[in-house]
Amino acid sequence: MGGRLWILYTVFLNQPLVCLAVAVLFFPVKADEYCPPSCLCARESGTVTCRDGEDTEMPGDIPEWASTFILRGNNMTTLQRGAFSPNGTERPLVTLSLSHNGIRVIEPYAFQGLCHLHLLDLSHNRLVSISPGSFYGLLALRSLNFNQSIVPHAAAQLLNALSGAEHLRSLHRLDLAGNHLKSVPLMRLDMSNLHTLVLTNNSIETIGRDNVASLYQRKRMRIYLSLNPFRCNCELEAFYYWLRNSSQCPDSGSLVCSEPEARRGVPLGNLREEEVDCANENLEAVSYVFLGLVLALIGVVFLMVLYLNRGGIKRWLNNIREACRDQMEVYHYRYEQDSDPRLANVAV
C-alpha cells in the first residue's frame, strides 16, 4: 500500500489528471458507496432522489442498498420493458415515485424485478398507452397512484391492465383522481384486498346498478367520489339508496347534483325519494300518455258526433243564416225610410 501511495504522490507532482486515473485503477469506488450522476443519495434512509435531469431513460445503476427511489422532472416518455431490472435481477425497492416526468407509454413487464415494491406513484404524467402486462410482477404492491395522469381515451387501457393483473392481489389503495373518468366498472377490478378507491374530481355522472351491486359485495372498500358532476335523476336511484344505507363513502356529505338545473348544487343526501324514484317517474310518464289518449278519444267522439249530425247541423246553420238575412232586411228597410227626403218634409 505504501508503494502505491508513493507512486501516486510522484505522478501527482507532474501530471494531476494522470494521477486521478491511476487512483481510480488502484482504489476503485465500492459499489455500495456509488451514487448515480445528478442524484442525491442518503444511505441512512435508503433513499435515492433524482430531480430535474435530462435523462430520457431510467438510470440503470441504482445502488443495491436503495429502498426508495424518487425520479421527478425528467424527460422520460417511455417506461421500457425491464426498465428497473435489465438483467432480470430483483431489486429491493419498496417505494418508487415517478411523478411529473411526462411519461406517456408503459410497456409490458416495465416493473419486472420489483417484487418487494409497496408503493408506486405515477401521478402527474401524460399516459396515452398502457400495455396489458404493465404491472406484471408487482406481487407486494399495496398502493398505486395515477392522480392526474391518464388521458381520457387511455382509461379503458388502464382498466384492462388492472383487471388482467393477477399479481395485484395485495393492492389496498388505488388513486384515480383528476383523470376525467366518466365511469369505472368496479366489477372488472378483481382485487379482493382493495380497501380504498379514490375517484374524486372526475366526470362521473352516475353510478350504475352493477357498480352498486359490487359495492354491496365489498363491505370493506372505501370509495371517495367528491367533485364529480352527478346527474340527479332516475338513473341515480340505486346509488342513492346505497349512499343512505352505507358508510363506505367517507365524503358522501360533499356529493352534490350538477343536473338538472333545478337541483344544481343540492347535496345528494338532501334529495327526496320521489326525485330519484324510477317508479314515480315511470308512473308520471304513463299518466301523461293516458291523458293524451283520453283527449284523443274525446276528439274522435266529437268528430263522429258532428259527422252523424251533419244534416241537422246543416239545417241549423241554414236557419241561422235565414234569420240573419231577415234581420238585415228589416234594418235595411228602416234605413231607407229614415233616409227618404219626402218623409222629412211631411214631418215639417
Image (spheres, helix red, strand yellow):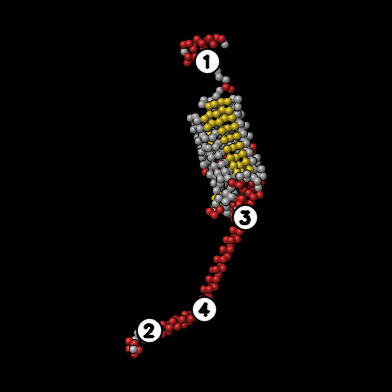
Q: Are marks 1 and 4 in contact (CB under 8 Å)?
A: no
Q: Residue reaching furthest bottom?
A: 346
Q: Tell us which disc is closer to us: 1 or 2.
A: 2
Q: Are marks 2 and 4 in contact (CB under 8 Å)?
A: no
Residue 348 x %, y %: 34, 89
Q: Tell us which disc is closer to us: 2 or 4.
A: 2
Classify mark 2: helix, strand or loop.
Answer: helix
Q: Earlier in the sequence, mark 3 or mark 1?
A: 1
Categorize mark 4 by other alpha carbons within 10 Å: few (<14), some (14-19), many (20+): few
Q: Tell us which disc is closer to us: 3 or 1.
A: 3
Which mark is drawn over residue 309?
A: 4
Q: Residue at x 50, y 9 (%)?
A: 10
Q: Are marks 3 and 1 in contact (CB under 8 Å)?
A: no
Q: Mark 1 highlights which residue? A: 23
Classify mark 1: helix, strand or loop.
Answer: helix
Q: Residue at x 58, y 32 (%)?
A: 96
Categorize mark 2 by other alpha carbons within 10 Å: few (<14), some (14-19), many (20+): few
Q: Tell us which disc is closer to us: 3 or 4.
A: 3
